[in-house]
Image (cartoon, rainbow, N blue to C red):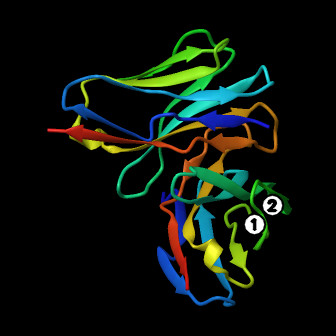
Amino acid sequence: AQTVTQSQPEMSVQEAETVTLSCTYDTSENNYYLFWYKQPPSRQMILVIRQEAYKQQNATENRFSVNFQKAAKSFSLKISDSQLGDTAMYFCAFMTDNYGQNFVFGPGTRLSVLP
Amino acid sequence: NAGVTQTPKFQVLKTGQSMTLQCAQDMNHEYMSWYRQDPGMGLRLIHYSVGAGITDQGEVPNGYNVSRSTTEDFPLRLLSAAPSQTSVYFCATAPSGLETQYFGPGTRLLVL
């Protein structure tokens, strides 16, 4: 069975600084997808970034980038120039390449951006 | 284009009562799913559907029923609510089972 671990229950960062959230996963699959979702106090789940395991290049979306280390099964999220609106729970998620779904979430990291 | 909608936003039930959580989407997505979110445990998959007429169980299906008679709707039924079902419930959709999921706003359920 696949598992996703986020070892940092809570983190904080000063506004405009950079922070990295950690995620590790365990799978025997070779083809899969990894995601970071953001959940602000509104509770809405918002996709931040997606990475396909077959791609060597790390995904980037504006101030958000990932460091994908397939051999180490690590998928960290870097937030640059942190903004107050980045305050949220961040969930790492894993999906196998099998139709019919196997979407697994980590327990989340609560990020606070401080003014 | 409303995306994914969920009703109600909040519900209080007594133990043993039944209710249906509604999920609707207007994006013509084939894949729909239900998750529950509990503190410290992330989201866990309850049931999912890969298309109208097809449903399957996820990680935590006990106590919940689903059906998928149309592409647009995927209701989640609690036949006899228990306090352990107190949670926040999210519906999610995707064009297919291999693509990024998009989440509804959630339903907060309290079972007394």
Q: Nearer the viewer, residue A86 or B42?
A: B42
Residue B19 screen position, x and y as percent? 65, 84
Secondary structure of the residue carrying tag 2 is loop
Please give the chain letter of the residue carrying mark 1.
B
Residue B22 screen position, x and y as percent? 61, 73
Left or right: residue A14 versus residue B64 is left
Q: Which mark is residue B52?
A: 2
Quadrant for residue A3, please give it: top right
Please determine whether, in this image, residue A47 is positioned above or below residue B22.
above
Secondary structure of the residue carrying tag 1 is loop
Q: Nearer the viewer, residue A81 or B84?
A: B84
Residue name at image x 75 percent, y 66 percent: B70
Left or right: residue A81 versus residue A94 is left
Q: What separation in Å lies between label 2 and label 1 (alpha carbons)?
A: 5 Å
Q: Nearer the viewer, residue B38 or B94?
A: B38
For the residues bearing labels 2 and 1, Cβ distance under 8 angstroms: yes
Residue B51 screen position, x and y as percent? 79, 55
Per the image, the residue denoted by label 1 is: B70
Please determine whether, in this image, residue B80 is positioned above or below residue B60.
below
Please determine whether, in this image, residue A63 is positioned above or below residue B43.
above
Residue name at image x 59 percent, y 35 percent: A5
Residue type, mark 1 in image:
Thr
Residue name at image x 72 percent, y 37 percent: B98
Please determine whether, in this image, residue B76 is positioned above or below residue A41.
below
Which quadrant is the C terminus of chain B positioned in? bottom right
Structural crowding at the residue carrying mark 1, measured as other residues with C-alpha within 10 Å and reported as few (<14), some (14–19) or many (≥20): few
Residue name at image x 63 percent, y 73 percent: B85
Residue type, mark 2 in image:
Ala
Residue B24 screen position, x and y as percent? 61, 66
